[in-house]
Amino acid sequence: MATARLDATFAALADPTRRAILARLAQGEATVTELVAPFKLSQPAISKHLKVLEKAGLISRGRDAQKRPCRIAPEPLAEANEWLEKYRALWEANFERLDDLLEELKSAKKPKKG
């Protein structure tokens, strides 16, 4: 996985408007006009966000007569998820070891009956 692509993905995902646009596109393709509707932003502002998403490879734009529908591109998100998954597994293993240690400490503190 290319570091530059991963960097571009995370940089694009850092903005809440771009994440909201991706969430909308996860439901199906949409035109720029359709993407502008739920936001209190101008069409040029949304277009700038779309350019960032497109440059990061997170969306693609098609041609349909006069429209240019946007659609989500899953590959960069899958790569980011794969990268994050490695760290999730690491942290889960660390937490399991911590849980085991805490259980040992609890058992050692319990007074013995008898």
Image: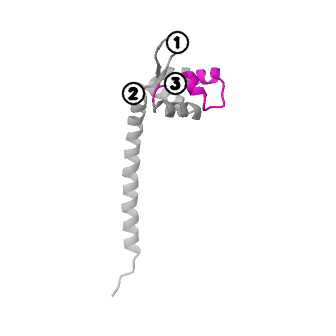
The furthest residue to the bottom = 114
Front residue of this view, candidates 60 and 27 = 27
Of the residues tagged 2 and 1, which is closer to the observer?
1
Q: CA distance from mark 2 to mark 1?
A: 27 Å
Relative placement, left or right, of 105 versus 70 is left
Mark 2 or mark 1, earlier in chain = 1
* Residue topped by disc 2: 75
The furthest residue to the left = 114
Relative placement, left or right, of 59 versus 49 is left
* Residue topped by disc 1: 66
Front residue of this view, candidates 2 and 32 = 32
Residue type at mark 1? Answer: Gln
Quadrant for residue 5, please give it: top left
Mark 2 or mark 3, earlier in chain = 3
Front residue of this view, candidates 18 and 9 = 18
The image quadrant where one finds the C terminus is bottom left
Q: Is residue 88 above or below residue 54?
A: below
* Residue topped by disc 3: 53
Q: Which residues are magenta?
A: 28-47
Does the segment drawn in magenta span residue 46? yes
**Residue name at image x 50 percent, y 34 percent:** 23
Instruction: Point out residue 91 in the picture as x, y percentages from the top left corner.
Output: 41, 48
Q: CA distance from mark 2 to mark 3?
A: 13 Å
Instruction: Point out residue 32 in the picture as x, y percentages from the top left corner.
Output: 56, 22
